Amino acid sequence: MPILDDVSSQMKDAMRTKAKVRLGALRSVRAAFLEALKADGSDTLADEKAIVILRKLAKQRKESIDAFDKAGRTDLAEQERGELAVLEGFLPSLADEATTTEWVKAAIAETGAQSPGDMGRVMGAVMKAHKGEVDGGLTKTIALKLLS
């Protein structure tokens, strides 16, 4: 089942069970999907595009959680954590640290990078080759460590 249809189906279930946080998260996902459909003028949304949108929404939730925690608003942070858990349920898992390290080493060899100044080329190579499979933050940390 395409992700768009799965979100719609789960949204109906959340309405029936009155799962407030889950419903809010699913509504925001569906709104983002519909916005992407309108921008393209298409009737369907490919799962690859849906995953990109979901990753963006998850990143926004993580940033909100950090901001709410720093502001002492644990109630809002908990709500965001609940929504993040819903979003992560639709996302494929990212590569672990060992796999990411191997990909970064391969990119360093491929690009001939030798210093932290070559970071952009390494990041570009890894992200292009493994888009949607790798965490950019983890990749950056590993690349900095290997290039230093």
Image (cartoon, rainbow, N blue to C red):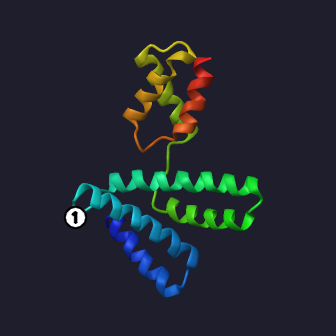
Position of 66 with respect to 16 (left or right) is right
The vertical placement of 70 against 137, above or below, is below
Observer able to see residue 45: no
Residue behind mark 1 = 43
Q: Quarter of the image containing the N terminus? A: bottom left
Position of 56 with respect to 82 (left or right) is left
Residue at (40, 70) in percent of width and height: 7
Q: Residue 93 placed where, x, y %? A: 49, 51
| Quarter assignment of residue 144 | top right
How packed mark 1 is, by other alpha carbons closer than 10 Å (few <14, some 14-19, many 20 or more), is few
Q: Residue 72 placed where, x, y %? A: 77, 59
Residue at (55, 80) in percent of width and height: 19
Total numbered circles: 1
The vertical placement of 121 against 40, above or below, is above
Q: Residue 33 placed where, x, y %? A: 36, 62
The vertical placement of 47 against 19, above or below, is above
Q: Residue 9 placed where, x, y %? A: 38, 76
| Quarter assignment of residue 143 | top right
Of 70 and 115, which appears nearest the observer? 70
Residue at (40, 61) in percent of width and height: 32
Give the farthest residue toward the bottom: 16
Of 111 and 62, which appears nearest the observer? 62
- Mark 1 residue element: loop
Of 84 and 106, which appears nearest the observer? 84
Residue at (50, 75) in percent of width and height: 23
Observer able to see residue 59: yes
Q: Quarter of the image containing the C terminus? A: top right
Q: Amino acid at mark 1?
A: Asp
Give the farthest residue toward the right: 72
